[in-house]
Image: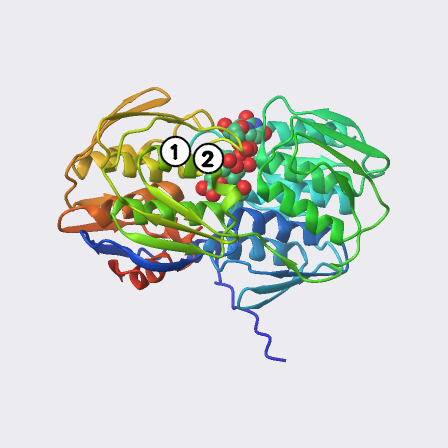
Amino acid sequence: MGTKTETAPTTYTAIYTHMDKFVIQGGTPLHGAIPTSGSKNAALPAIAAALLTDGEVQLRRIPRVRDIRTMERLLEDIGTEVQVNGEDVTLQTRQIVSPEAPYELVKTMRASSLVLGPLVARAGRARVSMPGGCAIGARPINLHLAALEQLGATISQEYGYIEANAPRGLKGAHIRFDRITVTGTEDLMMAATLASGETVMENAAREPEVEDLARLLISMGAKIEGAGTSTIRIQGVDRLHGTDAPHIIIADRIEAGTFLIAGAITRGDVRVTGCVPEHLDALIAKMQQAGVQIGRGADWLQVTAGGPLRAVDITTEEHPGFATDLQAQYMALMTQAEGISLITETIFENRFMHAQELLRMGANIRLEGKQAIVAGQTTLSGAGVIASDLRASASLVLAALVARGETVVDRVYHIDRGYEQIEAKLIAAGADIQRVE
Ligand code: EPZ
Protein backbone atom coordinates (compact mmCIF):
# COMPACT_ATOMS: atom_id res chain seq x y z
CA MET A 1 0.00 0.00 0.00
CA GLY A 2 2.97 2.29 0.44
CA THR A 3 1.48 3.81 3.58
CA LYS A 4 3.90 4.54 6.33
CA THR A 5 3.25 5.65 9.85
CA GLU A 6 5.95 7.95 11.17
CA THR A 7 7.44 6.62 14.36
CA ALA A 8 6.67 9.00 17.18
CA PRO A 9 9.43 9.84 19.65
CA THR A 10 9.25 7.96 22.92
CA THR A 11 8.63 11.01 25.08
CA TYR A 12 7.05 14.36 24.38
CA THR A 13 10.15 16.16 25.53
CA ALA A 14 12.17 14.26 22.94
CA ILE A 15 10.25 16.25 20.34
CA TYR A 16 11.71 19.47 21.67
CA THR A 17 15.14 18.73 23.03
CA HIS A 18 17.32 18.75 19.96
CA MET A 19 19.05 22.06 19.70
CA ASP A 20 19.83 22.82 16.08
CA LYS A 21 21.24 26.16 15.02
CA PHE A 22 21.21 27.99 11.72
CA VAL A 23 24.47 29.51 10.53
CA ILE A 24 23.55 32.17 7.99
CA GLN A 25 25.87 34.23 5.78
CA GLY A 26 24.04 37.37 4.79
CA GLY A 27 24.17 39.56 1.73
CA THR A 28 22.83 37.43 -1.13
CA PRO A 29 19.68 38.63 -2.90
CA LEU A 30 17.21 35.78 -3.29
CA HIS A 31 16.05 34.76 -6.75
CA GLY A 32 13.65 32.18 -8.07
CA ALA A 33 10.52 30.38 -7.00
CA ILE A 34 9.74 29.37 -3.43
CA PRO A 35 6.81 26.98 -2.92
CA THR A 36 4.28 27.37 -0.11
CA SER A 37 3.29 24.47 2.13
CA GLY A 38 -0.13 23.76 3.58
CA SER A 39 -1.19 25.99 6.44
CA LYS A 40 -0.13 24.83 9.90
CA ASN A 41 -2.91 26.81 11.56
CA ALA A 42 -5.54 25.31 9.25
CA ALA A 43 -4.11 21.80 9.62
CA LEU A 44 -4.19 21.82 13.44
CA PRO A 45 -7.99 22.20 13.80
CA ALA A 46 -8.52 19.88 10.81
CA ILE A 47 -6.67 17.13 12.66
CA ALA A 48 -8.70 17.83 15.82
CA ALA A 49 -11.90 17.54 13.76
CA ALA A 50 -11.17 13.85 13.29
CA LEU A 51 -12.28 13.39 16.92
CA LEU A 52 -15.86 14.24 15.91
CA THR A 53 -16.50 11.08 13.93
CA ASP A 54 -15.74 7.37 13.86
CA GLY A 55 -15.36 7.68 10.08
CA GLU A 56 -12.13 8.15 8.15
CA VAL A 57 -10.93 11.74 7.76
CA GLN A 58 -8.55 12.18 4.86
CA LEU A 59 -6.40 15.29 4.78
CA ARG A 60 -3.96 16.44 2.12
CA ARG A 61 -1.19 19.03 2.14
CA ILE A 62 -0.48 18.70 5.84
CA PRO A 63 2.86 20.45 6.47
CA ARG A 64 5.39 18.18 8.16
CA VAL A 65 6.21 20.54 11.01
CA ARG A 66 6.66 19.88 14.69
CA ASP A 67 3.33 21.29 15.92
CA ILE A 68 1.53 18.94 13.54
CA ARG A 69 3.45 15.95 14.89
CA THR A 70 2.53 17.07 18.39
CA MET A 71 -1.16 17.25 17.45
CA GLU A 72 -1.03 13.82 15.76
CA ARG A 73 0.62 12.44 18.89
CA LEU A 74 -2.11 13.95 21.05
CA LEU A 75 -4.84 12.36 18.92
CA GLU A 76 -3.10 8.99 19.06
CA ASP A 77 -3.18 9.21 22.86
CA ILE A 78 -6.87 10.02 22.73
CA GLY A 79 -7.54 6.96 20.58
CA THR A 80 -7.16 8.01 16.93
CA GLU A 81 -5.39 5.84 14.36
CA VAL A 82 -3.10 8.20 12.48
CA GLN A 83 -1.60 7.22 9.12
CA VAL A 84 0.97 9.57 7.67
CA ASN A 85 2.16 9.25 4.11
CA GLY A 86 4.19 12.34 3.25
CA GLU A 87 1.73 15.23 3.36
CA ASP A 88 -1.32 12.94 3.24
CA VAL A 89 -2.75 12.12 6.63
CA THR A 90 -5.64 9.74 7.33
CA LEU A 91 -7.24 9.75 10.75
CA GLN A 92 -9.85 7.48 12.25
CA THR A 93 -11.21 7.71 15.78
CA ARG A 94 -13.32 4.58 16.23
CA GLN A 95 -13.42 5.25 19.96
CA ILE A 96 -12.34 7.94 22.39
CA VAL A 97 -10.00 6.00 24.67
CA SER A 98 -8.83 8.88 26.87
CA PRO A 99 -10.48 12.32 26.49
CA GLU A 100 -7.47 14.17 27.81
CA ALA A 101 -4.77 16.64 26.72
CA PRO A 102 -1.87 16.36 29.18
CA TYR A 103 0.29 19.22 30.42
CA GLU A 104 3.38 17.93 28.58
CA LEU A 105 1.65 18.65 25.28
CA VAL A 106 -0.42 21.70 26.11
CA LYS A 107 2.60 23.53 27.50
CA THR A 108 4.49 23.08 24.24
CA MET A 109 1.55 23.85 22.01
CA ARG A 110 -1.48 25.87 23.06
CA ALA A 111 -3.41 24.72 20.03
CA SER A 112 -3.87 21.45 21.97
CA SER A 113 -6.91 23.18 23.46
CA LEU A 114 -8.56 22.59 20.05
CA VAL A 115 -9.46 19.08 21.22
CA LEU A 116 -11.68 20.46 23.97
CA GLY A 117 -14.78 21.22 21.87
CA PRO A 118 -14.67 18.02 19.77
CA LEU A 119 -14.15 15.82 22.86
CA VAL A 120 -17.04 17.25 24.87
CA ALA A 121 -19.27 17.07 21.81
CA ARG A 122 -18.44 13.47 20.95
CA ALA A 123 -17.56 11.89 24.31
CA GLY A 124 -19.45 14.19 26.69
CA ARG A 125 -16.24 14.84 28.58
CA ALA A 126 -12.84 16.47 28.14
CA ARG A 127 -9.92 17.13 30.41
CA VAL A 128 -7.37 19.61 29.14
CA SER A 129 -4.39 20.97 31.01
CA MET A 130 -4.55 24.72 31.69
CA PRO A 131 -2.41 26.42 29.07
CA GLY A 132 -0.44 28.75 31.35
CA GLY A 133 1.76 31.53 30.00
CA CYS A 134 3.70 31.29 26.80
CA ALA A 135 6.39 33.36 25.17
CA ILE A 136 4.00 35.78 23.49
CA GLY A 137 1.71 36.50 26.44
CA ALA A 138 -0.77 35.01 28.86
CA ARG A 139 -3.06 33.55 26.16
CA PRO A 140 -5.94 32.22 28.25
CA ILE A 141 -8.76 30.03 26.91
CA ASN A 142 -11.51 31.61 29.04
CA LEU A 143 -13.52 32.48 25.92
CA HIS A 144 -13.54 28.86 24.74
CA LEU A 145 -14.79 27.82 28.18
CA ALA A 146 -17.47 30.50 28.51
CA ALA A 147 -18.87 29.56 25.11
CA LEU A 148 -18.85 25.84 25.90
CA GLU A 149 -20.74 26.61 29.10
CA GLN A 150 -23.34 28.38 27.01
CA LEU A 151 -23.70 25.16 25.02
CA GLY A 152 -24.51 23.44 28.31
CA ALA A 153 -21.16 22.02 29.39
CA THR A 154 -20.19 22.15 33.06
CA ILE A 155 -16.67 23.46 33.50
CA SER A 156 -14.53 22.77 36.52
CA GLN A 157 -10.91 23.32 37.31
CA GLU A 158 -8.68 21.15 39.46
CA TYR A 159 -5.02 20.14 39.72
CA GLY A 160 -4.06 22.36 36.79
CA TYR A 161 -6.67 20.75 34.53
CA ILE A 162 -9.88 22.08 33.08
CA GLU A 163 -12.65 19.57 32.93
CA ALA A 164 -15.69 20.00 30.73
CA ASN A 165 -18.67 17.69 31.08
CA ALA A 166 -21.85 17.35 29.08
CA PRO A 167 -23.02 13.79 29.67
CA ARG A 168 -26.38 14.42 28.00
CA GLY A 169 -24.88 16.24 25.04
CA LEU A 170 -24.50 19.91 24.10
CA LYS A 171 -27.35 22.24 23.19
CA GLY A 172 -27.22 24.95 20.56
CA ALA A 173 -27.03 28.53 21.87
CA HIS A 174 -26.52 32.12 20.86
CA ILE A 175 -22.92 33.05 21.57
CA ARG A 176 -21.26 36.41 21.30
CA PHE A 177 -17.51 36.34 21.78
CA ASP A 178 -16.30 39.26 23.93
CA ARG A 179 -13.16 39.32 21.86
CA ILE A 180 -12.28 37.75 18.55
CA THR A 181 -10.48 34.44 19.06
CA VAL A 182 -9.31 32.22 16.20
CA THR A 183 -8.96 28.85 17.92
CA GLY A 184 -11.90 29.73 20.18
CA THR A 185 -14.12 30.13 17.10
CA GLU A 186 -12.77 26.87 15.69
CA ASP A 187 -13.19 24.97 18.96
CA LEU A 188 -16.79 26.10 19.33
CA MET A 189 -17.65 25.53 15.69
CA MET A 190 -16.54 21.91 16.06
CA ALA A 191 -18.48 21.47 19.30
CA ALA A 192 -21.65 23.01 17.83
CA THR A 193 -21.71 20.63 14.84
CA LEU A 194 -22.87 17.86 17.21
CA ALA A 195 -25.00 20.00 19.56
CA SER A 196 -28.77 19.73 19.34
CA GLY A 197 -30.44 22.64 17.55
CA GLU A 198 -28.95 25.84 16.23
CA THR A 199 -25.84 27.67 17.40
CA VAL A 200 -25.13 31.23 16.32
CA MET A 201 -21.67 32.63 16.94
CA GLU A 202 -21.27 36.37 16.75
CA ASN A 203 -18.00 38.30 16.68
CA ALA A 204 -16.46 35.12 15.26
CA ALA A 205 -12.96 35.11 13.77
CA ARG A 206 -12.91 35.62 10.00
CA GLU A 207 -9.52 34.04 9.35
CA PRO A 208 -9.18 31.86 6.23
CA GLU A 209 -8.26 28.98 8.54
CA VAL A 210 -11.74 29.17 10.12
CA GLU A 211 -13.30 28.99 6.66
CA ASP A 212 -11.12 26.04 5.74
CA LEU A 213 -12.22 24.17 8.85
CA ALA A 214 -15.87 24.86 8.00
CA ARG A 215 -15.30 23.40 4.52
CA LEU A 216 -13.87 20.25 6.07
CA LEU A 217 -16.71 19.92 8.59
CA ILE A 218 -19.31 20.41 5.86
CA SER A 219 -17.70 17.60 3.86
CA MET A 220 -18.17 15.47 7.01
CA GLY A 221 -21.90 16.25 7.10
CA ALA A 222 -21.98 19.38 9.27
CA LYS A 223 -24.42 22.22 8.54
CA ILE A 224 -22.54 25.51 8.75
CA GLU A 225 -23.21 28.89 7.18
CA GLY A 226 -21.30 32.14 7.32
CA ALA A 227 -17.75 30.92 8.05
CA GLY A 228 -15.40 33.69 6.93
CA THR A 229 -17.84 36.34 8.21
CA SER A 230 -18.31 37.46 11.80
CA THR A 231 -21.59 35.56 12.23
CA ILE A 232 -21.52 31.79 11.87
CA ARG A 233 -24.66 29.64 12.05
CA ILE A 234 -24.50 25.95 12.76
CA GLN A 235 -27.37 23.47 12.75
CA GLY A 236 -26.37 20.54 14.91
CA VAL A 237 -26.57 17.02 13.47
CA ASP A 238 -26.68 13.65 15.28
CA ARG A 239 -23.46 12.42 13.80
CA LEU A 240 -20.72 13.32 11.38
CA HIS A 241 -19.16 10.92 8.89
CA GLY A 242 -15.71 10.70 7.36
CA THR A 243 -14.68 13.06 4.56
CA ASP A 244 -16.53 12.54 1.26
CA ALA A 245 -13.31 13.28 -0.60
CA PRO A 246 -9.84 14.11 0.75
CA HIS A 247 -9.77 17.62 2.17
CA ILE A 248 -6.93 19.76 0.83
CA ILE A 249 -5.62 22.24 3.42
CA ILE A 250 -5.23 25.85 2.24
CA ALA A 251 -1.80 27.38 1.60
CA ASP A 252 0.06 28.82 4.57
CA ARG A 253 -0.42 32.58 4.19
CA ILE A 254 2.07 33.36 6.94
CA GLU A 255 4.77 31.24 5.35
CA ALA A 256 4.03 32.86 1.96
CA GLY A 257 4.22 36.32 3.55
CA THR A 258 7.54 35.45 5.18
CA PHE A 259 8.98 34.54 1.75
CA LEU A 260 7.64 37.74 0.19
CA ILE A 261 9.48 39.70 2.86
CA ALA A 262 12.60 37.54 2.27
CA GLY A 263 12.55 38.62 -1.37
CA ALA A 264 12.04 42.27 -0.49
CA ILE A 265 14.57 42.50 2.33
CA THR A 266 17.36 40.95 0.24
CA ARG A 267 16.46 43.22 -2.71
CA GLY A 268 15.86 40.07 -4.71
CA ASP A 269 13.31 38.76 -7.13
CA VAL A 270 11.21 35.96 -5.70
CA ARG A 271 8.07 34.23 -6.88
CA VAL A 272 6.10 32.65 -4.07
CA THR A 273 4.10 29.83 -5.62
CA GLY A 274 1.10 27.77 -4.50
CA CYS A 275 -0.33 30.54 -2.30
CA VAL A 276 -3.67 32.38 -2.12
CA PRO A 277 -2.87 36.06 -2.89
CA GLU A 278 -6.19 37.37 -1.42
CA HIS A 279 -5.20 36.02 1.98
CA LEU A 280 -2.22 38.39 1.97
CA ASP A 281 -3.91 41.62 0.87
CA ALA A 282 -3.05 43.57 4.03
CA LEU A 283 0.66 42.70 3.83
CA ILE A 284 0.78 43.30 0.08
CA ALA A 285 -0.76 46.78 0.47
CA LYS A 286 1.83 47.77 3.09
CA MET A 287 4.75 46.38 1.09
CA GLN A 288 3.59 48.20 -2.02
CA GLN A 289 3.36 51.47 -0.06
CA ALA A 290 6.89 50.74 1.12
CA GLY A 291 8.02 50.70 -2.50
CA VAL A 292 8.16 46.97 -3.16
CA GLN A 293 6.78 45.83 -6.51
CA ILE A 294 4.43 42.89 -6.22
CA GLY A 295 2.96 41.01 -9.16
CA ARG A 296 0.19 38.48 -8.70
CA GLY A 297 -1.45 35.58 -10.46
CA ALA A 298 -4.16 33.15 -9.41
CA ASP A 299 -1.86 31.25 -7.06
CA TRP A 300 1.42 33.12 -6.98
CA LEU A 301 2.95 36.41 -5.92
CA GLN A 302 6.15 37.88 -7.31
CA VAL A 303 8.19 40.35 -5.35
CA THR A 304 10.75 42.63 -6.99
CA ALA A 305 12.59 45.09 -4.83
CA GLY A 306 12.79 47.94 -7.38
CA GLY A 307 13.49 51.39 -5.88
CA PRO A 308 14.32 52.38 -2.32
CA LEU A 309 12.33 50.96 0.58
CA ARG A 310 10.26 53.47 2.56
CA ALA A 311 9.09 53.21 6.17
CA VAL A 312 5.36 52.43 6.48
CA ASP A 313 3.51 52.02 9.81
CA ILE A 314 1.42 48.97 10.62
CA THR A 315 -1.04 47.97 13.33
CA THR A 316 -1.83 44.30 13.79
CA GLU A 317 -5.48 43.33 13.65
CA GLU A 318 -7.67 40.32 13.24
CA HIS A 319 -8.19 39.14 9.66
CA PRO A 320 -8.57 40.82 7.18
CA GLY A 321 -6.24 43.29 8.96
CA PHE A 322 -2.47 42.99 9.19
CA ALA A 323 -1.68 39.59 10.76
CA THR A 324 0.13 39.53 14.09
CA ASP A 325 1.91 36.44 12.75
CA LEU A 326 3.68 38.67 10.19
CA GLN A 327 4.55 41.54 12.52
CA ALA A 328 8.01 40.28 13.49
CA GLN A 329 9.02 39.61 9.88
CA TYR A 330 7.74 43.04 8.82
CA MET A 331 9.80 44.64 11.58
CA ALA A 332 12.94 43.06 10.11
CA LEU A 333 12.00 44.61 6.74
CA MET A 334 11.47 48.05 8.30
CA THR A 335 15.03 48.04 9.73
CA GLN A 336 16.08 48.44 6.07
CA ALA A 337 13.55 51.11 5.03
CA GLU A 338 14.16 54.84 4.73
CA GLY A 339 12.56 56.70 7.64
CA ILE A 340 10.89 55.78 10.88
CA SER A 341 8.07 53.27 11.17
CA LEU A 342 5.67 52.67 13.99
CA ILE A 343 4.64 49.07 14.58
CA THR A 344 1.66 48.59 16.89
CA GLU A 345 0.82 45.13 18.23
CA THR A 346 -2.79 44.89 19.39
CA ILE A 347 -3.39 41.12 19.48
CA PHE A 348 -0.75 39.87 21.92
CA GLU A 349 0.70 41.84 24.80
CA ASN A 350 4.23 40.52 24.60
CA ARG A 351 5.14 39.90 21.03
CA PHE A 352 8.28 41.98 20.56
CA MET A 353 10.98 39.58 21.75
CA HIS A 354 12.55 39.68 18.30
CA ALA A 355 13.22 43.40 18.79
CA GLN A 356 15.83 42.67 21.49
CA GLU A 357 17.62 40.25 19.20
CA LEU A 358 17.39 42.58 16.19
CA LEU A 359 19.03 45.25 18.38
CA ARG A 360 21.94 42.88 18.90
CA MET A 361 22.34 42.79 15.13
CA GLY A 362 22.53 46.59 14.95
CA ALA A 363 18.88 47.57 14.45
CA ASN A 364 17.60 50.79 15.96
CA ILE A 365 14.29 49.97 17.66
CA ARG A 366 12.64 51.52 20.68
CA LEU A 367 9.83 49.74 22.49
CA GLU A 368 7.04 51.65 24.19
CA GLY A 369 4.34 49.33 25.44
CA LYS A 370 2.41 48.02 22.47
CA GLN A 371 4.51 50.00 20.03
CA ALA A 372 7.87 49.56 18.42
CA ILE A 373 9.51 52.55 16.80
CA VAL A 374 11.91 51.40 14.14
CA ALA A 375 14.48 53.77 12.68
CA GLY A 376 15.37 52.34 9.31
CA GLN A 377 18.36 52.02 7.01
CA THR A 378 20.48 50.39 9.67
CA THR A 379 23.37 48.22 8.62
CA LEU A 380 22.79 44.91 10.31
CA SER A 381 25.72 42.72 11.19
CA GLY A 382 25.88 39.05 12.01
CA ALA A 383 25.61 38.08 15.67
CA GLY A 384 24.57 35.18 17.85
CA VAL A 385 20.81 35.45 18.41
CA ILE A 386 18.21 33.30 20.10
CA ALA A 387 14.88 32.32 18.61
CA SER A 388 12.10 32.79 21.16
CA ASP A 389 8.88 32.00 19.32
CA LEU A 390 7.98 30.82 15.88
CA ARG A 391 7.52 34.14 14.09
CA ALA A 392 10.24 35.92 16.07
CA SER A 393 12.64 33.26 14.79
CA ALA A 394 11.52 33.87 11.22
CA SER A 395 12.26 37.56 11.62
CA LEU A 396 15.79 36.77 12.80
CA VAL A 397 16.38 34.57 9.78
CA LEU A 398 15.18 37.40 7.52
CA ALA A 399 17.46 39.91 9.25
CA ALA A 400 20.37 37.47 8.95
CA LEU A 401 19.81 37.26 5.18
CA VAL A 402 20.74 40.95 4.83
CA ALA A 403 23.22 41.22 7.69
CA ARG A 404 26.92 41.57 7.03
CA GLY A 405 28.80 38.42 7.91
CA GLU A 406 27.64 35.43 9.87
CA THR A 407 24.57 35.10 12.09
CA VAL A 408 24.01 32.10 14.30
CA VAL A 409 20.33 31.61 15.17
CA ASP A 410 20.03 29.37 18.22
CA ARG A 411 16.99 27.26 19.25
CA VAL A 412 15.79 26.67 15.76
CA TYR A 413 13.20 24.22 17.13
CA HIS A 414 10.90 27.20 17.45
CA ILE A 415 11.03 27.71 13.70
CA ASP A 416 10.63 23.98 13.06
CA ARG A 417 7.31 24.14 14.92
CA GLY A 418 5.71 25.92 12.02
CA TYR A 419 7.91 26.26 8.94
CA GLU A 420 8.40 23.22 6.74
CA GLN A 421 12.05 22.99 5.69
CA ILE A 422 12.52 26.72 5.71
CA GLU A 423 16.25 26.50 5.15
CA ALA A 424 15.91 24.17 2.16
CA LYS A 425 13.39 26.51 0.57
CA LEU A 426 15.54 29.60 1.13
CA ILE A 427 18.73 27.82 0.02
CA ALA A 428 17.04 26.89 -3.26
CA ALA A 429 16.51 30.64 -3.82
CA GLY A 430 20.20 31.36 -3.18
CA ALA A 431 20.42 31.88 0.59
CA ASP A 432 23.52 30.67 2.44
CA ILE A 433 22.17 28.76 5.44
CA GLN A 434 23.56 25.76 7.23
CA ARG A 435 21.78 23.76 9.89
CA VAL A 436 24.19 22.52 12.55
CA GLU A 437 23.51 20.48 15.65
C1 EPZ B 1 -4.25 31.73 16.67
O1 EPZ B 1 -3.95 31.60 18.05
C2 EPZ B 1 -3.03 31.23 15.93
N1 EPZ B 1 -2.79 29.84 16.29
C3 EPZ B 1 -1.83 32.11 16.27
O2 EPZ B 1 -0.74 31.69 15.48
C4 EPZ B 1 -2.16 33.55 15.91
O3 EPZ B 1 -1.10 34.38 16.32
C5 EPZ B 1 -3.45 33.99 16.63
O4 EPZ B 1 -4.52 33.06 16.31
C6 EPZ B 1 -3.90 35.38 16.24
O5 EPZ B 1 -4.09 35.45 14.85
C7 EPZ B 1 -3.46 28.88 15.68
O6 EPZ B 1 -4.28 29.11 14.82
C8 EPZ B 1 -3.14 27.48 16.07
P1 EPZ B 1 -6.60 34.02 19.65
P2 EPZ B 1 -5.10 31.71 19.14
O7 EPZ B 1 -7.43 33.13 20.51
O8 EPZ B 1 -6.34 31.18 18.56
C9 EPZ B 1 -6.92 36.56 23.71
C10 EPZ B 1 1.57 31.23 15.04
O9 EPZ B 1 2.63 31.88 15.13
N2 EPZ B 1 -7.77 35.46 24.17
O10 EPZ B 1 -7.19 34.53 18.40
O11 EPZ B 1 -4.57 31.09 20.37
C11 EPZ B 1 -5.50 36.09 23.47
O12 EPZ B 1 -4.75 36.11 24.65
C12 EPZ B 1 0.49 31.36 16.12
O13 EPZ B 1 1.33 30.41 14.16
C13 EPZ B 1 -8.39 35.54 25.40
O14 EPZ B 1 -8.24 36.52 26.12
O15 EPZ B 1 -5.23 33.26 19.31
C14 EPZ B 1 -5.04 37.09 22.44
O16 EPZ B 1 -4.63 38.26 23.06
C15 EPZ B 1 0.91 31.90 17.42
N3 EPZ B 1 -9.18 34.49 25.83
C16 EPZ B 1 -6.28 37.34 21.58
O17 EPZ B 1 -7.38 36.95 22.43
C17 EPZ B 1 -9.37 33.38 25.07
O18 EPZ B 1 -10.09 32.47 25.51
C18 EPZ B 1 -6.37 36.56 20.29
O19 EPZ B 1 -6.05 35.21 20.53
C19 EPZ B 1 -8.76 33.30 23.82
C20 EPZ B 1 -7.96 34.35 23.39
- The label on residue 286 is 1
- The label on residue 330 is none
Residue most extreme to the top: 368
Above or below, 379 relative to 201: below
Above or below, 207 relative to 62: above
- The label on residue 282 is 2
Above or below, 94 relative to 188: below
Q: Secondary structure at mark 2?
A: helix
- Is residue 389 visible to the viewer in this orientation of the structure? no
- Is residue 201 visible to the viewer in this orientation of the structure? yes
> x, y (%) of residue 102?
57, 46
Task: Tell me the distance, in whole angstroms, between the alpha carbons under discs 1 and 2.
Answer: 7 Å
- Badge 2: how crowded within 10 Å, few (<14), some, or many (20+)? some
Query: Nearest the camera: 227 or 10?
Result: 227
Q: In the visual, does 285 lie left or right of 309? A: right
| Residue type, mark 2 in image | Ala
Tell me the residue at 34%/54% (across/down). Answer: 270
Query: Quadrant location of the C terminus?
Result: bottom left
Tell me the residue at 35%/32% (across/down). Answer: 289
Query: Nearest the camera: 135 or 285?
Result: 285
Give yes or no for contact between labels 1 and 2 (Cβ–Cβ under 8 Å). yes
Q: In the visual, does 343 lie left or right of 81? A: left
| Residue type, mark 1 in image | Lys
Question: Could you say which quadrant of the image residue 97 lies in?
Answer: bottom right
Question: Could you say which quadrant of the image residue 431 lies in?
Answer: bottom left
Query: Quadrant location of the N terminus?
Result: bottom right
Question: Could you say which quadrant of the image residue 293 lies in?
Answer: top left
Scheme by which the image is coloured: rainbow
